[in-house]
Amino acid sequence: MRILLIHADRFSFRVTGETSVALPTELDKAKSEGEVGEALVAFVAAEKGDETNVGSVVDQVIEQVLTVGAQLDTDNLVIYPYAHLSSTLSSPRGAVKLLDEICTRMQSHNQFKITRAPFGYYKAFEISCKGHPL
């Protein structure tokens, strides 16, 4: 799994259309649009091979998010599927399984209010990045 973490002053997104791998159930679990102030934004891409050890991959993502989150003064976390981070993507169902597990396990830490963008949809987003050395 590839992740890109950005500390943002503001982040917003909105669904603009479906991709060929869109799963209708994603809009039940994730929002079709969202806006948050002061947030840690996690752009994530599930890769081939991640599905064989979901627990380990999720553990690593959570460890990274919690480590960076502990250094920041924010209560918000955005989980944003972003296929552009990898050229060796997992299956759509595998990616959704990983996203579900990341969100579920992050919620148990009670550190962040989590906003999840849907997997398999085209989305427009705006970000205002803090630009500090983290």
Image: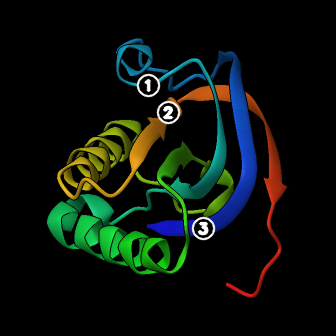
Upstream in sequence: badge 3 or badge 2: 3
Q: Quadrant of the N terminus?
A: bottom left
Q: Is 31 situated left or right of 19 in this image?
A: left
Residue 6 location (% of width, % of height)? 67, 65
The residue that label 2 is drawn on is: 119
The CA distance from mark 1 to mark 3 is 19 Å
Which residue is pictured at 53% across the width and 67% down the height?
3
Q: Which type of secondary structure does the marked residue at label 2 adopt? A: loop
Residue 5 numbered mark, or none? 3
Q: Quadrant of the C terminus?
A: bottom right
Q: Is 35 situated left or right of 72 in this image?
A: right
* Amino acid type, mark 2: Phe
Q: Which of labels 2 and 1 is toward the front?
A: 1
* Amino acid type, mark 3: Leu
Q: Quadrant of residue 50?
A: bottom left
Q: Nearer the viewer, residue 54 or 126?
A: 126
Residue 116 numbered mark, or none? none
Q: Quadrant of residue 11?
A: top right
In contact (CB < 8 Å): disc 1 and disc 3: no
